[in-house]
Amino acid sequence: LTKSPATEGDATNKNACSNGLALTTHTDPSCDVKCKAGYNLGAKTIKCASDAVNGAKATGELTCTAITIKATTSLQFKGMSEAQFNADPNIKANIKTGVEAALTGITVDASTIV
């Protein structure tokens, strides 16, 4: 079993999938995955059919899509003109760092901060 970079084992039911796990028809026929933080909510049970042959593909694919956020709030910096804001290369990087720290698992593209 190979998980996507956007998924991780879901231990909610003590049956988390892990990279390299080989499901079997009877002793270990399933495991659970979920989308990582920063992706849409989703979870799925991956299953091995009871009549599967060695090397057969398991069923239960999970697609995780990165969450994107469109900022709709304007930030105002007292005592700083728009020209000063745009001229300082560190301001956007600092905003990016602050937002990512506040929103665990969310990545901010600093080039989109205007």
Image (spheres, rainbow, N blue to C red):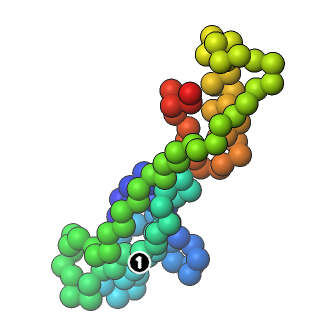
The one nearer the camera, 107 or 19, is 107
Judge whether 14 appears above or below 113 on screen. Answer: below
Dot 1: within a 10 Å radius of its alpha carbon, few (fewer than 14), some, or many (20 or more) residues? Answer: some
Instruction: Name the kind of residue labelled 1 in the image.
Output: Thr
Q: Residue 103's x, y, as percent?
A: 66, 48
Report which residue position mark 1 lands on: 45
Query: Who's the residue at 40% across and 66% down the image?
Result: 21
Q: Residue 2's x, y, as percent?
A: 36, 59
Q: Visible in this render: residue 110?
A: no
Is 56 on the left-hand or right-hand side of 77?
Answer: left
The one nearer the camera, 80 or 62, is 80
- Outermost residue toward the right in this view: 79
Which corner quadrant of the image does residue 72 belong to? top right
Query: Who's the residue at 21% across and 88% down the image?
Result: 51
Q: Visible in this render: residue 7?
A: yes
| Disc 1, SS | strand
Is 35 on the left-hand or right-hand side of 85?
Answer: left
Quadrant of the frame with the N terminus: bottom left
Query: Who's the residue at 41% across and 59% down the image?
Result: 64
Q: How many circles with numbers are drawn on the protein?
A: 1
The one nearer the camera, 29 or 77, is 77
Query: Who's the residue at 41% across and 78% down the image?
Result: 45
Is 55 on the left-hand or right-hand side of 36?
Answer: left
Judge whether 42 appears above or below 45 on screen. Answer: above
Q: Residue 32's x, y, as percent?
A: 46, 74
Quadrant of the frame with the C terminus: top right
Judge whether 67 appears above or below 9 on screen. Answer: above
Judge whether 64 appears above or below 82 on screen. Answer: below
The one nearer the camera, 5 or 85, is 85
